[in-house]
Each structure stands twice: as C-alpha cells, then as structure tokens.
Image: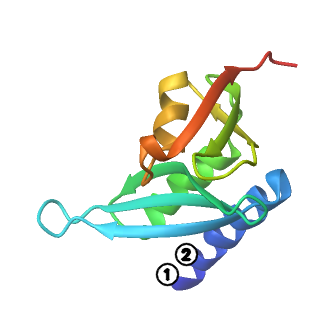
Amino acid sequence: MKNKRFSLESDIITHVYEDNKNTVHFNYRVDIDGDNTVTLELFTFNKRTNSVFLLHRTKGENSIKALSEMYDYINAEKHDMSPYLVTWSKNDEDETHVSYFWESSKTDVYNKFFYNKKVEDYKIDIELRPLS
C-alpha cells in the first residue's frame, strides 16, 4: 500500500514540477469523528515568491483513493476550467508577483489564493485570460 501511495505522490510531484516548476506538498487529514474518510489537500510552493497556494482538495475512503482522485484531477484536461492570471503583492512589500490558476470561476481562484491567508494582508487583481 505504501508503494502505491509513494508512486502516486511521485507522479503528482513530477507532473506539477514539469508544468510550473513549483514543489507540491501533501496534507492528509482523517475524519475520526465522522466516517473516517481521508481528506487530501495539495499545496504548491513557489520558492521565488515564497508563496503557498492550495492546488486542489480531494476525499477518499483511504489515502490511496484520495491520491487517485488527486492524480485524476492533475492529469485531466481542463475542459471545464478557464485560465486566470493573478497579480498580487503583500501589503508590506513593494514587489508585485504574478501567479496562474486554472479554475471554474473567479471565486474559486480567490478562495484558493487566500486559503490559510488573511485577505487584509494582500492586494490582488484576478484577470480571466483568453484560451489560446
């Protein structure tokens, strides 16, 4: 079981790094008060901007099922998503950064950008990009 988990994690790590040169980090949580499902949150880390963003969240009856869902999401064509460009800066810094998201809506981009962040600490502009 661990070999399957490590293999799926490795495939996801490779895919994301080849796509955007960011590292990925896995956060597993077990719902011990409910149905014992595993929630997997996948985060990206950009060393250049020192930023962390939620890439996606999945659930499964165990870590392998949650990882398989994540793998399918990472490798799926983005037919129902649109490309967004986010221009952002921290309020206490002068440097402006650009990040890219594929999402279904501007609200989804906003929620992923601000996951575990304080809204009042950032200035952001979200722009829908044309499909090429």
- Image coords of residue 109 (percent x, y): 55, 33
Amino acid type of the residue that numbered disc 2 sits on in the rendered structure: Arg
Amino acid type of the residue that numbered disc 1 sits on in the rendered structure: Met
Residue 4: tell me if it is visible: yes
- Image coords of residue 19 (percent x, y): 82, 51
* Location of residue 77 (image quadrant): top right
Is residue 102 or residue 107 the one in the foreground?
107
Q: Is residue 100 above or below residue 121?
A: above
Residue 1 — which label? 1
CB-based contact (under 8 Å), mark 1 and mark 2? yes
Left/right of residue 64 with respect to residue 15 in the rendered view: left
- Image coords of residue 95 (percent x, y): 75, 48
* Location of residue 28 (image quadrant): bottom left
Viewport quadrant of the C terminus: top right
Left/right of residue 52 with respect to residue 1 in the rendered view: right
Is residue 32 or residue 68 the one in the foreground?
32
* Location of residue 34 (image quadrant): bottom left
**Residue at 66%, 33% in the rendered image:** 102
Classify mark 2: residues with Cα within 10 Å, few (<14), some (14-19) or many (20+).
some
Secondary structure state at the residue bearing disc 2: helix
Secondary structure state at the residue bearing disc 1: loop
Task: Work out which residue is located at the far top of the displayed protein and give it.
Answer: 130
Residue 79 — which label? none
Q: Is residue 87 above or below residue 128?
A: below
Looking at the rendered image, the disc whose residue lies closer to the viewer, 1 or 2, is 2
Task: Work out which residue is located at the far right of the displayed protein and give it.
Answer: 132
Classify mark 1: residues with Cα within 10 Å, few (<14), some (14-19) or many (20+).
few
Distance from label 1 to label 2 (Cα)?
6 Å
- Which residue is labeled 2 in the image? 5
